[in-house]
Image (cartoon, grey):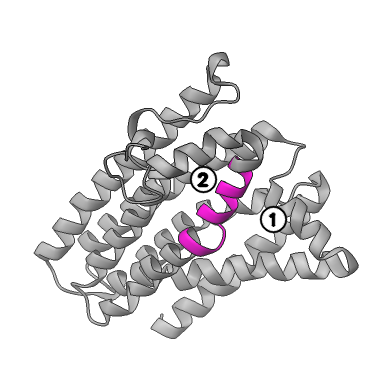
Amino acid sequence: MSALLLILSALVGLCVVFAGCYMLARHINNYGIVDIVWSYAFALLALFYAGFAPGWPGRKTLIATMAALWSLRLGTHLYRRVMGHHPVEDGRYVQLRQDWAGNFAPKMFGFFQLQAASVVLLGLAFFIVCLNPAPRLHPLEITAAVLWLLALGGESLADAQLAAFKRDPASQGRVCDAGLWRYSRHPNYFFEWLIWVAYFVFALASPWGWVAVIGPASILFLLLRVTGIPLTEEQSIRSKGEAYRRYQQTTSAFVPWLPRKLP
């Protein structure tokens, strides 16, 4: 299968998957499930490339395993969060219902299809790696695998610490500032970005690997400027008020760092 046909086949397949996701979201009246499907879609994409691209099997197996484990962990984490609040919908989608009230259905369907395209675009690292025929791993690829492992562990730990905090009845109305959350207001986002950096570093050992920079660059922009930190902190200020504003003054927004002392 040619490289272009591989990408087009992946795009068409994921458009079908997200169309089905849209129909399910309409049926249960909760469009937040698109986040779950988006996360799981990367496992499908990486396994598809590993199965049909002509690269070295050892390399394809490694990158597909990395992508699938990350994808399944994140997707399952989001499934528990989204369905744990169902039928209450994530605030982002409640806002979209209001913003698109005049033409909601077609706009939301288009949004779901854009999610399919974003998976293919961000997944260029997997595509590039799976085309590489070199019969041994490059030191960059080994370094990337180690970085990926550390980042996945950090993200999992941050999510577990936040979940434990929320389960504690004494945490009601308080800000989570324990564990990794003492050093970053969003350690889960930081380690998620590091995972994408690891995919980029892995791809650098393959021809045209630099193209994969679109992954960490796009994720960083979204986390810092669009749907990550800005929306999360707006919601935190609404729910926690002055306590969260104090947390903002003392704690790094993204990169873990020592807390600042208030005067």
Task: Name the residue that disc number 2 marks.
Answer: 75
Residue depicted at x 60% and y 25%: 173
Residue sitting at the far right: 102
Does the segment drawn in magenta span residue 232? yes
* Residue 227, x across and y down, in percent: 57, 58
Relative horizontal placement of residue 250, taking residue 110 as reference (left or right) = left
Task: Say if 150 sits above or below 226 in the image.
Answer: above
Residue 47's image quarter? bottom left
Label 1: element kind: helix
Q: Residue at x 41, y 80 (%)?
A: 1
Near-viewer residue (169 or 201): 169
Residue 79 drawn in magenta: no
Q: Where does residue 129 sit, x and y in percent of width and height?
A: 28, 70
User: Image quadrant of residue 117?
Assistant: bottom right
Give coordinates of residue 103: x percent, y percent. Answer: 87, 69
Image point (14%, 64%), residue name: 140
In depth, the one of 7 and 218 nearer the eye is: 218
Find disc 1 in the rendering and name its residue.
21
Indicate the quadrant where residue 239 lies.
top right
The image quadrant where one finds the C terminus is top left
Q: Report the disc number at residue 247.
A: none
Task: Give, as a single range, the part of the protein colored magenta.
Answer: 224-236
Q: Residues within 10 Å of mark 1 (few under 14, many from 20)?
A: many
The amino acid type, in three-letter code, at marker 1 is: Cys
